[in-house]
Image (tube, rainbow, N blue to C red):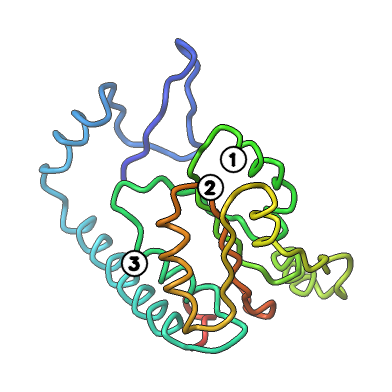
Amino acid sequence: MIYIDFVIDGGTSYRPALPGTSGVVGDVKATLAALLPLPISKKKRNSLMAAQRKMQEWNALLARVAATERAPLRPRLVLRALSDRLARDAVISLDVDNGGFSQLMAGLATAVKYELPVKIIVLKNNSLAEVLFEQAGLGNPPFGCDLSPIDFAGFANNCGADGFRCTTPSEVRSAIRDTLQSARAAVLEAVVDANEKPALTDESQV
């Protein structure tokens, strides 16, 4: 496994808190091009193959989960449909649900002002879902996690951006297509299941 230590501000480096075996200084692209063809020991190759099998199992499970059509929408169905339409060089920022976007809504007006054609996909469940599941995991009752049902598509239109919404599986792909094809800043509000818990591989259910 390769960890990259970035040097910034003329000398300040970021070092991940992980043990290393060999240190190499160089241009990232050129160094990786030289390292990748090198042979891998049998032990490391077995570990690599095991990790690749786990990844294949995970992707297959996600594909089955994403193919389960129901309303409210499953978040993974929306994300899979989005992934299928993204350009290979797309620049994406994750972890924007309705709780996160509610704290950053003024940024959309800035994008409109400066004609930045950013696209925002909001997984709307009217809840601080991650906090809610953390509370449940600690054995605590839910507290302070309900959010007001903001009309994010309407807000986008009022800002001068394009607003779209999908609530059923049949609407998802066309809504994503229209959002990505917009020449302006655009927001897609996808109404998802508030009870869909972020899960590890062995916890995900189809």
Q: Residues within 10 Å of mark 2 (few under 14, many from 20)?
A: many
Q: Which residue is mark 2?
A: 185
The image position of residue 120, as x and y in percent, is 55, 54
Count of numbered tags = 3
Front disc: 3 or 2: 2
Location of residue 81 by image quarter: bottom left
Location of residue 24 by image quarter: top left
The image position of residue 57, as x and y in percent, is 34, 77
Provide the secondary structure element on which disc 3 rests: helix
Query: Could you tell me which residue is drawn at 10 percent across and 43 percent down?
Result: 37
Front disc: 1 or 3: 1
Query: Is label 1 in contact with label 2 (beta carbons under 8 Å)?
Result: yes
Q: Is residue 72 above or below residue 95?
A: below
Query: Is label 3 in contact with label 2 (beta carbons under 8 Å)?
Result: no
Q: CA distance from mark 3 to mark 2?
A: 20 Å
- Left or right of residue 32: residue 140: right
Q: Amino acid at mark 3?
A: Asp
Q: Earlier in the sequence, mark 1 or mark 3?
A: 3
Q: Amino acid at mark 2?
A: Ala
Q: CA distance from mark 1 to mark 2?
A: 6 Å
Query: Could you tell me which residue is drawn at 60 percent across and 61 percent down?
Result: 122
